[in-house]
Image (tube, helix red, strand yellow):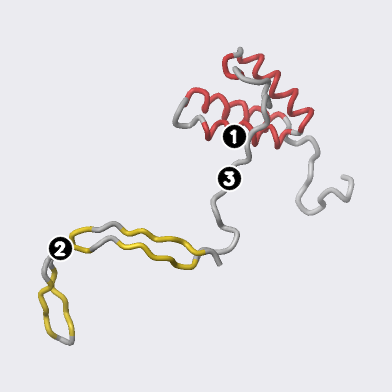
Amino acid sequence: MAKLTIRRKGHTRKAFTAKRGGKKIKVAKARVNPSTFKISDRGKQGRGPRVVPPLEEGALGGQGFFDRSNEEQEQIVFNRAKEMGERKVVGELRALQVFFKRTDPQKSRRALELSKKVAGSFKDRQKVSYPEGFGKKQ
């Protein structure tokens, strides 16, 4: 198991009254020193941070994708979805949506809008009903 380093800041603890063996004891205000120690990681295996893989260079027509017209953006996205598959393109657009969420909300909203358009247009290409699945023809 991995070892984690814990660093605790020093602080001033307030005075309080403690119950010890049925007696009330007053504990004075005190300074708690900073400390550093190691513990073994108690987290469940495989539950680490989710890291978004880096986007390919020029994936959506290179830099300036959001500077182009809306029609041009849609054309690029749909052509790429036909080539690479709808799920990959939607994933790239959702990643851009998250990356731009705080820095450029307008681009973030546009990426979400495009991802919904792509996901909606490629839906039901091959219908799969619940009990049958792909195996049986309807």
Query: Is there a contact, CB below 8 Å, between mark 2 and mark 1?
Result: no
- Nearest to viewer (mark 2 / mark 1): 2
Q: Residue at x 45, y 28 (%)?
A: 103
Where residue 121 sits, quadrant-wise, is top right
Sequence-wise first label, 2 or 1: 2
Q: Position of residue 136 (x, y in %)?
A: 88, 50
Instruction: Specify the quadrant that holds the C terminus.
Output: top right
The crowding category of the residue bearing disc 2, from other C-alpha atoms within 10 Å (few below 14, some 14 to 19, many at least 20), is few
Would residue 40 appear left or right of 112 to someone viewing this image? left
The crowding category of the residue bearing disc 1, from other C-alpha atoms within 10 Å (few below 14, some 14 to 19, many at least 20), is some
Q: Which mark is residue 51?
A: 3
Query: Is there a contact, CB below 8 Å, between mark 2 and mark 3?
Result: no
Instruction: Specify the quadrant that holds the N terminus.
Output: bottom right
Would residue 134 appear left or right of 123 to someone viewing this image? right
Measure the C-alpha gap from mark 2 to mark 3.
Answer: 41 Å
Residue nearer the viewer, 31 or 22: 31
Mark 3, secondary structure of its residue: loop
Q: Is residue 70 above or below residue 57?
A: above
The three-letter amino acid code for the residue at tag 3 is: Val
Q: Residue at x 66, y 21 (%)?
A: 62
Q: Position of residue 129 (x, y in %)?
A: 78, 47
Residue nearer the viewer, 104 or 5: 5
Sequence-wise first label, 3 or 1: 3
Residue nearer the viewer, 127 or 107: 107
Q: Position of residue 123 (x, y in %)?
A: 72, 35
Q: Residue at x 59, y 34 (%)?
A: 94
Mark 2, secondary structure of its residue: loop
Q: Which mark is residue 94?
A: 1
Residue nearer the viewer, 132 or 63: 63
